[in-house]
Amino acid sequence: MMDTVPDKTFFRIGEVSRILAVPPYVIRYWESEFKIIKPARTRSDQRLYRRQDVQNLLAIKRLLYEEKFTIEGARNHLQGHRANPGLVRSDRDVIEEIRNGLLWIKEKTG
């Protein structure tokens, strides 16, 4: 999987598949489950994903594969994130912040 999305405007499903390191059928399934993924279509009905779609797909993959969300849980998380983008953080970010706070307390109390 690539760490960053290449600097392009549109991506075909094969390119998105390589970026995410998942088969194209998984991307098509996520597209049916997550309404934020809305690829454009060419005259020959091929999908063209925008850069934002690819970034959203990367977020979906992280939620499902790394953070072990269900499809429904990931959908709710993404909807909450769009409604309150400054309020929603990943579990890892919260745990890291708590860990750093505890280490700081331990350091100060000796």
Image: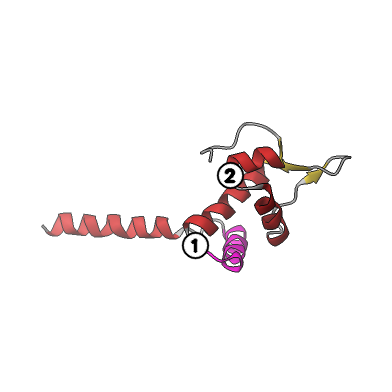
- Which residue does the image show at 54% across and 59% down from the upper left? 64
Amino acid under disc 2: Leu
Task: Tell me: residue 9, above or below residue 38.
Answer: above
Q: Which residue is mark 1?
A: 68
Give x and y (percent) for residue 18: 61, 39
Give x and y (percent) for residue 16: 65, 41
What kind of element bears circle 2? helix
Amino acid under disc 1: Lys
The span from disc 1 to disc 2 (Cα, nearest Å) is 16 Å
Residue 73, picture quadrant: bottom right
Task: Specify the quadrant that holds the C terminus.
Answer: bottom left
If you read the primary sequence from the N terminus, does the residue marked by circle 1 or circle 2 appear first? 2
- Which residue does the image show at 41% across and 55% down from the upper left? 93
Residues at circles 1 and 2 in contact by the CB criterion of under 8 Å: no
Q: Furthest residue to the right? A: 43
- The residues colored magenta run 69-84
Give x and y (percent) for residue 6: 61, 33
- Which residue does the image show at 60% across and 47% down from the upper left? 22
What kind of element bears circle 1? loop
- The reply, left or right, for residue 49 in relation to residue 69 is right
Task: Tell me: residue 38, above or below residue 71.
Answer: above
Residue 78 inside the magenta-drawn segment:
yes
Q: Which residue is mark 2?
A: 20
Q: Furthest residue to the left? A: 110
- Magenta segment, prevailing SS (helix, strand or loop): helix
Task: Tell me: residue 4, above or below residue 73.
Answer: above
Q: Residues within 10 Å of mark 2 (few under 14, many from 20)?
A: many
Q: Which of 92 and 82 lies nearest the eye of the viewer? A: 92
